[in-house]
Amino acid sequence: MKIVVTVKLVPDTNAEKRIDATTKRLVRTGVETVLNPFDEYAIEAALQLKEKLGADTTVTVLTMGPESGKEVVRKALAMGADDAVIVSDAPLEGSDVWVTGNVLAAALKKNGFDLVIVGGLAEDGNTGGVSGALAEHLGVPGLTNAAKIDGKLRVERETDSGHQTVSAPLPAVLMVTMGVGEPRYASLKGIMGAKKKPIAIVPIAELALDHPVGTDGAKTELLEIAKPAERGKGKVVTAEDGPAGAKIIFDFLKERKLV
């Protein structure tokens, strides 16, 4: 089986985030770039599946970003992925979820795949829309919120009310949750071996794209940015008993149309 894990390179999750007032985009210069933490769970899921299926299974890491991100991608290779592909080109700057899905789908069609595994969210955007966009662009089944996977793509989905067991034929796109298990640490052997694993840089000219990229192809536009209102002081109330306290809370929520 050929497994491809899509990953995103994001600003350090512990760094202070700034928005450029002109472009309305996250300022990435001067901040360390790291592998999106949610995507590490997708890598872990892929490596677990490779261990179950045997040596003929391969894991490729796919991302869209600057070529300078090669060293960040090597973390995924050190964890156990076999190789990586970075789609990198200046016109890609400003791409939204729809464009990202289109570009990554074109790269997947070019390189081939049986199963695409995607993390649940990106630390910087938090849209959670790439897995659905990929499934749509590729014309394959898309399964979401998977916490457990077996080799026949039978998965256990996490839902608000419990768990749901679903299956799908390959090829397919699978979005996983943190329930798949904690991402493994890279061993010293893995870190040393990652230096020899191939990372291909692919410009958009090599992809059969049928739509513009970057801001020209984006379906969404950010119109305005504003800081959230400062939180006021909390209100402390004293109730005579439990029922009276419950009524105070209920009235508070009802007044704000929250119930």
Image (tube, rainbow, N blue to C red):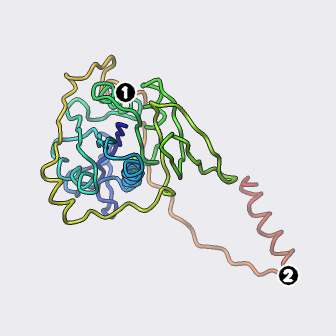
Viewer-side residue, 216 vs 58? 58
Q: Which residue corresponds to mark 1?
A: 102
Measuring from the top left, give residue 150's x and y in whole percent: 50, 46
- From the image, tell me which residue sits under label 2: 241
Q: Can you say whether 85 is above or below 42 in the image?
A: above
Residue at image coords 81%, 80%: 239
Asked if residue 200 is positioned above or below residue 12 in the image, the reply reads above
**Discs 1/2, front:** 1
The image's mark for residue 220 is none
Near-viewer residue (246 or 202):
202
Secondary structure, mark 1, is: helix
Q: Residue at x 42, y 50 (%)?
A: 52
User: Could one spot residue 86 in this view of the protein?
Assistant: yes
Q: Earlier in the sequence, mark 1 or mark 2?
A: 1
Q: Quadrant of residue 106?
A: top left
Q: Nearer the viewer, residue 136 or 232?
A: 136
Amino acid type of the residue that numbered disc 1 sits on in the rendered structure: Asn
